[in-house]
Amino acid sequence: MVIPLEGLEYHPSGGLADQHGGPAAVSKSAPLWVRVRKNHWTTRLIALAAFLVVWWILTTPWAWNGDKPIMLPLYLPSIPSVWNAFIRANTIHPIAEGVDREVVGEYGYYLWQHLLATLQRIGIGLFFAIVIGLPLGLLMASVKIISVSVEPYINFLRSLPPLGYIGLLIVWFGIDNTSKIWLLFLAAFPPITIATIAGVSGIKEDQIHAAQSLGASRLQVVSSVTVPAIAPDLITGIRVALGFAWTTVVAAELNNGIPGIGGLAYLSGTELKTPLTITCIIVIGITAIVLDSIIKAMERVLTPWRGKA
Amino acid sequence: MSRDKSLVVDGVRQFFGPKNSRVQALSRTDLVIEPGQFVCLAGPSGCGKTTLLRLIAGFINPSEGQITVSGSEIIGPGPDRGVVFQSPTLYPWMDVASNVELGLKFQGVSKDQRRADSERYLQMVGLTDFAHRRTYELSGGMQQRCQIARVLASDPEFILMDEPFGALDALTRERLQNELLDIWRKTGKTILFITHSVDEAVFLGSRVLVMSPRPGKIVFDEPAIFSKPGESIAAEEIRSLPAFLELRERVRSSIQHSH
């Protein structure tokens, strides 16, 4: 079984930064069009600048438009107002202009506290997903009866959108952290189990035979061959699981999600605080990319033989 | 015939596939391998050589008959029968030295003793400088040498080799053949060596077997006198001996006639 995923291919020589960055050997003094052709980072910077310019054009008041921006701030806030929302969410500030009472960040928490609360939930959910998903995968790979009877349920669970069963989880586990962690766990463990099964079925029979002929006991075969052999697949599974959990996070935090970056994104949207919503979206997106990069880096450090043997 | 430490294949037949459409891989085979022999088993591809080796290794169980070592039946793989696989099955998550030490680790040998042993065997196969490299950094020939060192280090009574030099270029192959003969002379291990090369079989073996295909059957079994423990004659000299050429010709014709 293989989990096909776009962008997950292994690049033997690809560093973190130049995964899609192409060769970096382009002189700084080379003309711009040469750099665009040769260096993807230059292209990306230009694309980002173009994006910001379009944003700026759409949100700046224009005289010919009756001193109004093309898109109203409620739909698309200006760049400075998003920046202000970001600053506001990270500082102690007056509750409103001209009022003495000061509050912390947004809804009583700094932005980083919202983010941390979410990361904690994901961390705990992912932890249990590994603790349950890995042994379950090993069991399913080695005991036919378990695999035949459990696999349909895992596929069923995997196909459900988390929003479909969050209500049920709240009824079962309450509105607090427990139901959120359950949701993240349920999103994260099927990919880990499936990756484990794929890893075990990918072990070459002779690698097991070789260990047995060297005198390995059953337990020694598992610890010296099975576990290291599935490590690359397992890490890929964890990477996929983290991605699923992360995209599930807003659903998990729809109810009583403060503190939590997903809850903040949802709540600020319902209260028409669009600049704050956009701030949250940017933070959620960047965090996801950073987490993914961390796992990719771990992959290179922990399983350097991947794709080579 | 001393049966105390011999490996005895007794009335073994092997079938594969479901009962109604089963294929016979090995017709009734009887074979005794005496301690210290270097048995070379030659034959065309797909004739059942590897099946016989895997039966002796304990990776598969015979459909009929039994295989015994020192009188006790083989029921699975064991450290008394080391296996050198056709394609090296080294573990890429360990460095070269740890691969070589693995058998000793399984046997509970102390770390210092393991280090000392692996250094000795790595030196024997000429990989001392690569002890702390990853296995995938080695060339094919080096990987095969590492595999041989790993098997030697775990000190089996029998070494089963399945076309170990089949994928190597001619020069590397010849060098490894000489190294293997050296090792055999030094250690006096019992070796079963499978090859599809007649020249290799006659050059290496102290006894040459030929297997005919479909179903596999041993049709030729003669001692070869060219490499004896304690002696070392230059490889070129052996290959130019009239007796060597004569035996090689007879082995070749027995393979051709068995088709």
Image: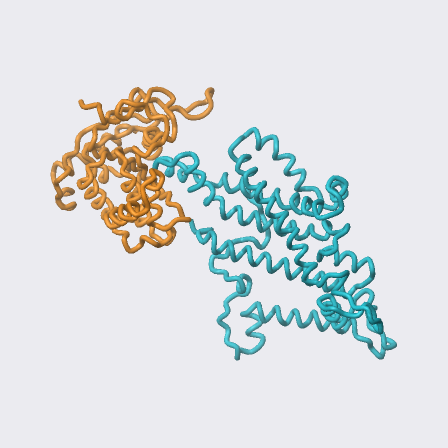
Chain colours: A cyan, B orange
**Of residues B47 and A245, the one drawn nearer to the viewer in this rendering:** A245
In the displayed structure, B74 sits above or below B197; it is: above
In the displayed structure, B251 sits above or below A180; it is: above
Q: State which quadrant residue B242 falls in.
A: top left
Q: Residue at x 55, y 55 (%)?
A: A295
Can residue A61 be seen here?
A: yes
Residue B163 position within the rendered picture, expressed as x and y whole percent measured from the top left: 31, 39
Q: Quadrant of the N terminus of chain A?
A: top right
Q: Is residue A295 left or right of residue A256?
A: left
- In the current view of this chain or complex, which residue is farthest to the front? A101
**Of residues A91 and B234, the one drawn nearer to the viewer in this rendering:** A91
Q: How many marks?
A: 0
Q: State which quadrant residue B207 falls in.
A: top left
Residue B167 position within the rendered picture, expressed as x and y whole percent measured from the top left: 33, 45
Residue A9 position within the rendered picture, expressed as x and y whole percent measured from the top left: 54, 53
**Of residues B132 and A66, the one drawn nearer to the viewer in this rendering:** B132
Residue A222 position within the rendered picture, expressed as x and y whole percent measured from the top left: 45, 38
**Of residues A141 and B139, the one drawn nearer to the viewer in this rendering:** A141
Q: Is residue B118 left or right of residue A75?
A: left
Q: Residue at x 13, y 43 (%)?
A: B232
Can residue B168 be seen here?
A: no
In the displayed structure, A7 sits above or below B250; it is: below
